[in-house]
Image: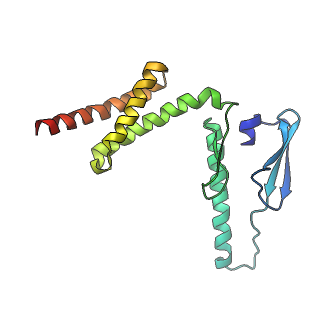
Amino acid sequence: MMTAKFGVPEKPWLRLVEECDLSKLWEGLDAKTGVTLNCYHVCTFNASESRDNIRPKVTQLLKLCRRAVNNIGTRRIEEHIYQLDDDAQKFQITAGCGSVDYFRDNLYKRLAEAFHNFYYMLTGNPALFNLAEFRLYEAFYIELVKSYPRDSLQLALERYLQVKTIVDSMLAHQTNS
């Protein structure tokens, strides 16, 4: 999150702290003058510990590593929605510094993914498909195309047309029955 807010700092420093304080993850005002990242203590392993004593620590460490990897990934693909805790209850959304240039295309990718999932449902497990939900996504897509067309909407178009064809066929079949 620090790099999303400031960019990559020219002078990064690390400070060891005992506990995580979500209100104070770092200190510094910009990448030029430097930023200090607070690194909190996660756990301590001892060679004499039994496997049963180590397991919860490993679980805790794995959660932290997963969160770190996910946050690095979200930064790399310019999505800028960062998970703050290991239980996925607290998030921070960062605008600016990259996000403002990519948020539309990221949304259009998610829309393409939604239409692809609707296609998957219709062809694999139709009980999962919800026509009203599809209609909401469809209306949103149509309004986006009308008001703010972008090349990145083409990815959603292909998937939308696949689903629309199946839905239209399905509804025509119900009408004729």
The figure's colour scheme reads rainbow
Residue placed at 38% from the left, 38% from the top? 116
Count up the numbered dots.
Answer: 0
Percent from the top left, x then y, of residue 124?
Answer: 29, 47
Vertical comparison of 99 with 68: above or below: above
Q: Quadrant of residue 171?
A: top left
- In this image, 155 relative to 171: left or right? right
> Which image quarter is the N terminus in?
top right
Q: Closer to the camera, 62 or 156? A: 156
> Which image quarter is the C terminus in?
top left
Percent from the top left, x then y, of residue 159?
Answer: 37, 32
Q: Quadrant of residue 4?
A: top right
Residue at the left extreme, as displayed: 177
Residue placed at 63% from the left, 66% from the top? 59
Percent from the top left, x then y, of residue 136?
Answer: 39, 36
Can residue 149 be spotted in the picture?
Answer: no
Can residue 167 be spotted in the picture?
Answer: yes
Q: Closer to the camera, 36 or 145? A: 145
Vertical comparison of 6 with 84: above or below: above
Q: Quadrant of residue 47?
A: bottom right
Residue placed at 74% from the left, 52% from the top? 22
Q: Closer to the camera, 1 or 89? A: 89
Vertical comparison of 119 with 24: above or below: above
Residue placed at 34% from the left, 43% from the top? 120
Percent from the top left, x then y, of residue 134?
Answer: 35, 38
